[in-house]
Image (cartoon, grey):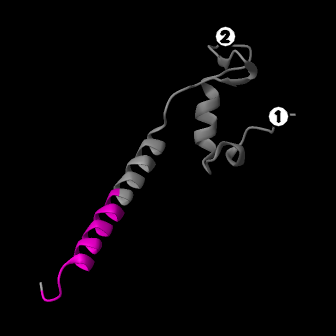
Amino acid sequence: AMPEAGPSTWGTSSQSAVEDYLAKYRVHAWVKVHYDPRDPAEARLEVGVETVHVISLMVSLLFDGLGIWMMVLWRRRASAPIGA
C-alpha cells in the first residue's frame, strides 16, 4: 500500500508545499508519466535534477578541492628544507 501523501512522506515540513505539488496532479486527470521500460513499476511524474542537489554537489566539490589544495600545500611544506 502506498503511504498517504503528506509532509513526512515528501521530505518537507511544509503542508502548503505538498498541497501545491498535488494540485498539479488532479484525480482522474491525464498526465505524462516517465517510466523504466525494464521495470514499469519505477515511474515518475517529474524527472530532472533539483536545484538543491546541484548546490550540494557544488559545495562538496568546493570542499574536496579545498582539501586537495591544503594537502598539496602541506606536502610542499613538509618536503621543503628546514629554514626555508
Query: Could you say which quadrant of the image residue 72 lies in?
Result: bottom left
72 vs 61, nearest the viewer: 72
Amino acid bearing label 1: Met
Residue at the spot 63% in from the left edge and 36% down from the top edge? 19
Counting from the top left corner in percent of width and height, residue 35 is at: 67, 19
Label 2 belongs to which residue? 30
Position of 48 relative to 73 (above/below): above
Q: Main secondary structure of the magenta part?
A: helix
Bounds of the magenta span? Answer: 65-83
Counting from the top left corner in percent of width and height, residue 62 is at: 34, 55
Label 1 environment density (alpha carbons within 10 Å; few <14, some 14–19, many ≥20): few
Label 2 environment density (alpha carbons within 10 Å; few <14, some 14–19, many ≥20): few
Residue at the spot 63% in from the left edge and 47% down from the top edge? 11
Label 1 belongs to which residue? 2
In magenta segment, residue 68:
yes
Q: Is residue 60 left or right of residue 34?
A: left
Q: CA distance from mark 1 to mark 2?
A: 20 Å
In magenta segment, residue 47:
no
**Quadrant location of the N terminus?**
top right
Under circle 2, the secondary element is loop
Residue at the spot 62% in from the left edge and 13% down from the top edge? 32
